[in-house]
Image (spheres, rainbow, N blue to C red):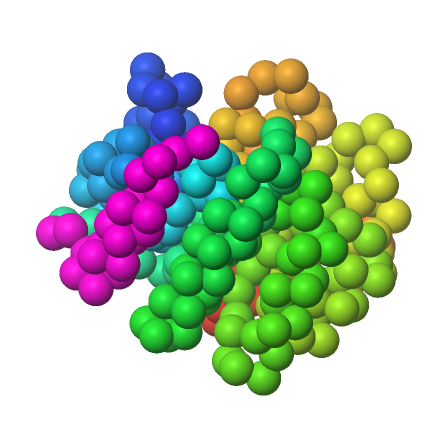
Amino acid sequence: MIDTHSHIYEPEFDLDRDDVVARAKAVGLERLLLPAIDSASDERLFATCRRYGDYVVPMMGLHPTSVNDNPSWREELLRVERYLAAPPQGIGHFCAVGEIGLDLYWSREWREEQLEAFRQQLEWSLAYDLPVVIHTRDAWDDMVAVIGEYCNRGLRGVFHAFSSDVACYEQLRACGDFLFGIGGVVTFKKSPLADVVPSMSLDDILLETDSPYLTPVPHRGERNESSYTRFVCAKIAELHNVDYEDVVCRTTASAKRMFNL
C-alpha cells in the first residue's frame, strides 16, 4: 500500500515519529507521500525527508488556508516556485504540486486570493510536468469550474479527501487524468462517502490517511497515522465487494503511475 497523503512531519508526531514509521512498514506501507502546507512547516517536512530517505516523498505547494489573512501569500507562492525549480539538497524530488486548492469553510473573504494562488500553482504543475494534489472544502462548485478551464491542457492529479457526490466525481473525471483520495471518512457511521465509493472505479481511487487528521474507525477520536491506511483499504474492499488485496494492488498501481514512483 501507499499512503498518498500523510503529514507525519507535523508536531503531533514529534515524540514517536520513528515508531509511527515502523508501524507503517510493519503493515505493508511501502511509501508515504508528504504534502506541503506553507513556509512555517517547510523545515519539518524537509527534515523528515532527510531522516527517512526515499521511504517518504515530498510535494511542494501552498495550502489554501495559508492564503487566508496572510499579507505575504504572494511571497509564499514565490517560495513554492523556487523550490519546484531547485529542491533543497537531501530530500529527493517533489512528486507533485500540493497540497493546493480551495477552502471556503472558515471564510469566503479570501476566495479571490485563493483562486489566484490555486490557478498559479496549476500553471506551475503544467510547466514542471507534475501532478497536482488538490484540497477542496466547501468549494466544490468553484473547484469544478476551475478544473473545467483546464480540460484538454494536460492537467492531472488527485482530489485529496474527496467528499462530494457521484455527479461531481463524474464531472471531474471527465476533465482529464484525475484520481480521488479516499481516507478515514469513508469508515464513519452513516458517512455519505460510503454511498459514493461503490460508484467509483477502483482504478480511480487512491488510499490516504491525512495523518494526523480524519482518523478512521476503529480509532476515530485518536491521532491518525499511516498504518491506519489498512482500515480505509478494508472498507473500500467491503463497499466494492472485492478482496482486500485487490484494492491494495489497484490503488498502489494507480499511485505509482500518477506520482511516477
| Residue closest to the eye, 217 or 58 | 58
Residue placed at 68% from the left, 64% from the top? Answer: 145
Residue 247 in sight? no
Magenta part, dominant SS: helix
Q: Pinpoint residue 63: horizontal percent, then vertical percent.
A: 45, 43
In this rendering, position of residue 204 left or right of residue 71: right
Residue placed at 51% from the left, 80% from the top? Answer: 154
Residue 4 to residue 25: above or below: below
In this rendering, position of residue 242 left or right of residue 177: right
Residue 134 to residue 108: above or below: below
Picture quarter containing residue 70? top left
Query: What is the number of callouts on the image?
Result: 0
In this rendering, position of residue 134 left or right of residue 247: left
Q: Pinpoint residue 192: horizontal percent, then vertical percent.
A: 85, 41
Picture quarter containing residue 161? top right
Q: Pinpoint residue 138: horizontal percent, then vertical percent.
A: 70, 41
Q: Please give the range of residues in magenta.
A: 69-89
Picture quarter containing residue 43? top left
| Residue closest to the eye, 142 or 39 | 142
The C terminus lies in quadrant: bottom left
Residue placed at 21% from the left, 57% from the top? Answer: 82
Based on the picture, tell me whether residue 74 belongs to the magenta stretch: yes
Q: Which residue extends farthest bottom?
A: 152
In this rendering, position of residue 43 left or right of residue 156: left
| Residue closest to the eye, 61 or 260 | 61
Residue 43 in sight? yes
Residue 109 to residue 55: above or below: above
